[in-house]
Amino acid sequence: MIYSMTAFARVEKTTSQASIQWELKSVNHRFLETHFRLPESLHDMESDLKTLIRCGLSRGKVDCVLNLTTTKTSHTEINANELEQVLRTIKRIRKASPHVAKPDALDILRWPGVISVSGKPGAKLRTEIQSTFQAALEQLIEHRNREGEKLRSILLNKLGEVSTLVLQARAVMEGVGEARHAALLKKIAALDLNVNPERLEQEVVMLVQRADVMEEMDRLEIQVGEASTALGNAGPHGRRLDFLMQELNREANTLGSKSVLPETTRISVDLKVIIEQIREQVQNIE
């Protein structure tokens, strides 16, 4: 199964204690990277929530935002001891480096521990927050799955186009020996030269060998088969597919550099265009 790394999920739940809303958004990334925006009183939950994400996802940048409105009245108090310690630290820094900008009051109040909030969420509400997050994560994974299936269909069609072009190249190359022979005879006739027939045959063989791209076309077909197999099996396959696209592009470049016929040059260009289209889509696969 193929999963896209691009998805969005929103889940809301209202309890007797609070209104809970989770928003999860994921985009493509080389690794799994998570970012949380939580109320300060719930920062200790972040580690457990990250563990849930790691159990369900392997790649992608995931932003998780919790909007929490509690029905229970809370009170905000300033921690005098913590505030005094912060102010002393600021004073020492400014004494050592007078050019450092002086922080304003809001910057100081944002320092962890300076403000304490009474009426923190209890165990029951925390359980509700985590279960709502789990529901949002499942929704995100479902979205990634739907997008992945669409990508899978697109990629299989594009790989089919690559296979068709390789077959066209094979058909063209079947007559390359005769074409090179005829072209060489035409040049010799124009120059009115007497050429040893055996020597002529040797030159034709050398020209055909230099233009031989059967090995490249064989590898193109093998890599297309590998990519198609990966798309039909359980993932994640994003990195593997990305590597295969690099190899496909390399073989297409070699086909173009060895080309001695306008038709094979055109096929090489068409191959590179399609392979680049595939590579762009592969960047979104987990």
Image (spheres, rainbow, N blue to C red):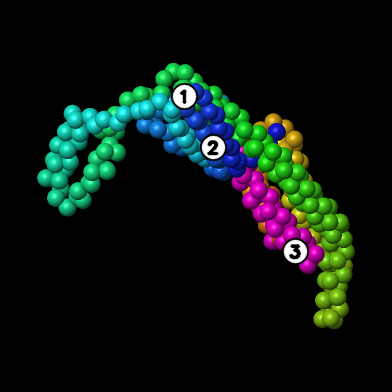
The x, y position of residue 206, in whole percent, is 77, 61
Residue under label 3, please give it.
265
The x, y position of residue 237, in whole percent, is 65, 37
**Sequence-wise, which precedes: disc 1 or disc 3?**
1
Q: CA distance from mark 1 to mark 3?
A: 69 Å
Crowding near the residue tagged with mark 1, few <14, some 14–19, many ≥20 C-alpha atoms within 10 Å:
some
Q: Say which of marks 3 and 2 sits in front.
A: 2
Name above or below for residue 260 compared with residue 93. below
Q: Which mark is residue 24?
A: 2
Taking the image as shown, residue 77 lies to the left or right of residue 2, namely left
Taking the image as shown, residue 275 lies to the left or right of residue 170, namely left
The x, y position of residue 266, in whole percent, is 76, 64
Q: Which mark is residue 167?
A: none
Residue under label 1, please give it.
17
Q: Main secondary structure of the magenta part?
A: helix
Query: At 56% across and 43% down in the image, what residue appears?
Result: 27
